[in-house]
Amino acid sequence: MKIEQRLWTKDSGWNCRQPLPTGMSPDLVFVFGATALLEGELLQEVKRQYPSAYICGCSTAGEIADGQVLDDSLATTALAFEHSEVRASETNVRGPADSFAAGQTLVSALPADGLGPVNTT
């Protein structure tokens, strides 16, 4: 697995903390940031930067990067897997009472082909 980390701040713009090796495309990107930034153009930039990756994340009350807690920033971690495949599903949850049914919906939407048991030992 290879990792690329980027951080956006109002003062510096985008800063790539750790780039992926040339020619590697990430499979999965985690995005954490202020709600206003996730609803704006910056999230679209992330999608353009990683067009073939599954992008997931959430808003935060502060982003952590290089041992600092920041506000009004956007932090991304892009993962490129050498031998794994990312599969995803999504559903809406209206409240806590919907949680169990949402979990069932998520699991049933994932294709089982190629999945194997998890070794927990």
Image (cartoon, rainbow, N blue to C red):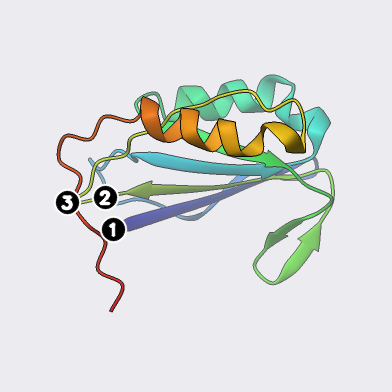
Give the x, y percent position of residue 116: 18, 51
The answer for how far apart the CA atoms under marks 3 and 2 are is: 6 Å
Q: 107 left or right of 80?
A: right
Image check: 88 left or right of 62?
left
Question: Which residue is rendered at x = 32% and y = 57% of the image?
Answer: 2
Which residue is disc 3 drawn over?
A: 83
**Quadrant location of the C terminus in the rendered image:** bottom left
Which residue position is annotated with label 1?
Answer: 1
Looking at the image, is mark 3 or mark 1 earlier in the sequence?
1
Q: Is residue 62 left or right of residue 114?
A: right
Residue 94: x and y in percent read 75, 25
Q: Which secondary structure lies at badge 3?
A: loop
- Against 68, is 62 above or below? above
Question: Which quadrant of the view contains residue 52?
Answer: top left
Q: Residue visible at 73% across and 21% down? A: 40
Which residue in the protein does label 2 denote? 81
Q: Are marks 3 and 2 in contact (CB under 8 Å)?
A: yes
